[in-house]
Amino acid sequence: MEKLVIEGGKPLSGAISIHGAKNAALPILAASIMAEGTVKIENVPDLSDIGVMLGILRSLGCKVELAGDTVIVNTNAVHQYHIPESLMSQMRSSIFLMGPLLARLGKVELYQPGGCAIGERKIDLHLKGLAALGVVIEDNGSRIVCTAKELVGADIVLDYPSVGATENIMMAAAMARGKTTLTNAAREPEIQDLQNFLNAMGARIIGAGTDTITIEGVPELVPCTYRIIPDRIVAGTIMIAAAVTRGSVTLNGVCPAHLTSAIHVLKRAGVQITIDGDIMYVCGSGRLKAVERIVTSPYPSFPTDLQSQIMVLLSLADGVSIVKETVFEGRFKHVDELSRMGADIRVDLNSAFIRGVPRLYGATVEATDLRAGAALVIAGLTAQGTTVIEQIHHIDRGYDRIELMLRSLGANILRTAPVVME
Ligand code: EPZ
């Protein structure tokens, strides 16, 4: 199996462009099947999760071609409403196909996506929202069959601002008869990107980015060409890596407004950040300071997807910090691995108490999930000695060749080839 090998201690320096957002590309690729014809989606990152989504689109009958970072999807032959369990099990984001398939074919058959390393990941809010739109749901606990003779607009209030549920309901409601109002909707930038994509195909949606989204259903959507927003979590990951290595990095093609809470925390920790349009300059020359309390919660608060990464910075800051994870119940699996590198972290329920230490030490560690793996990379970049990271397929789900990104900034990191047993 492939591994990442990192010699720590080199400050990152130079400039990097941030690739397209995984969490915008996945729902937008799913939504492409809602229009008949050829849809072009630009700035799509080359990630394993994207590859799985393209495989699902092909299994539904789409013709999918790649031209650089542009994905060209011909949806004319979409006929299949059954999502293979093998593909579902590879990526829970397959559930983004529910809304689009119900809108296009009036039916979808899939399997409970199940939990993952960071939590149970239920989909009850998705199903409740779709049922409110007239979808009949048969769920035997593993296999789910949804049918809708007609999707009808409704007033829906989400019990929790779920990103995925907001997106699935938006997509189904876009082609429902009548008006849908979605209250307590998630406000993430990726939802705004999905709204803009759907509207470019002729949908009539307003309010994404606020907690109330209004959708006027239309009878059909038409193909379009659309460019995905940059990945705010990849940008945040690079910013934290620059800070902990005492580096100086320029990030090009970013949306600073998507990172307001992360920028605020990094500045409180003593990181210098300058913004010039879609460019951010990050410098970690000063001492890192503890941040008394960081609470992850839905956008625009501090993102759960940067929680593992910021914990590395806090492990090297002067003083004690507290990180409270309120979005996922199991998102502290990186703590044991960081502790093996010398971090001083104590977990109590969903809070982590981090006491800064002078340095971390290289070790052989294991990525347990996507963002935990990214945190271990950051730790390896600053650790004294060599760090070997195993199970790096988790990292490849959300970072396009992370070792090449970091080598372009001067890091001493390489990916070992898988050992082929004779
Ligand atoms: C999206 O996941 C992202 N994934 C996640 O990014 C991100 O961490 C998460 O939003 C929160 O921002 C994609 O967009 C592909 P949720 P999603 O529905 O939609 C509970 C990454 O690292 N919940 O907002 O699954 C759920 O269990 C990934 O890039 C229900 O209880 O997130 C969780 O505790 C990780 N019932 C919380 O809500 C439901 O029906 C947040 O889930 C749905 C969710």
Image (cartoon, rainbow, N blue to C red):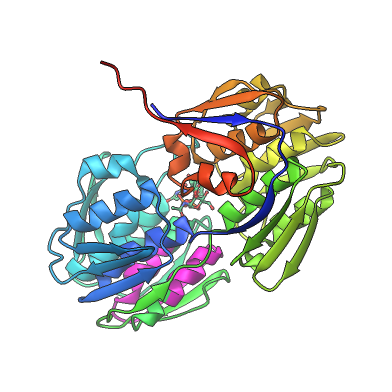
Q: Residue 88: horizontal and vertical position, in percent?
A: 28, 44
The image shows residue 154, relative to residue 397, as above or below, that is below
Splitting the image into 4 quarters, where does residue 150 fall? bottom left
Left or right, 70 with respect to 105, comes to right
Q: Residue at x 47, y 45 (%)?
A: 401
Q: Residue at x 31, y 62 (%)?
A: 30
The stretch of residues the image draws in magenta is 167-196
| Quarter the C terminus occupies | top left
Left or right, 10 with respect to 101, comes to right
Magenta segment includes 111:
no
Splitting the image into 4 quarters, where does residue 16 fall? bottom right
Q: Is any part of residue 300 visible from this angle?
A: no
Residue nearest the observer in this picture, 21 or 354: 21
Left or right, 418 with respect to 351, comes to left
Residue nearest the observer in this picture, 169 or 60: 60
The image shows residue 207, relative to residue 148, as above or below, that is below
Q: Residue at x 69, y 27 (%)?
A: 348
Q: Residue 238: horizontal and vertical position, in percent?
A: 63, 50
| Quarter the N terminus occupies | top left
The image shows residue 141, relative to residue 296, as above or below, that is above
Splitting the image into 4 quarters, where does residue 28 fall? bottom left
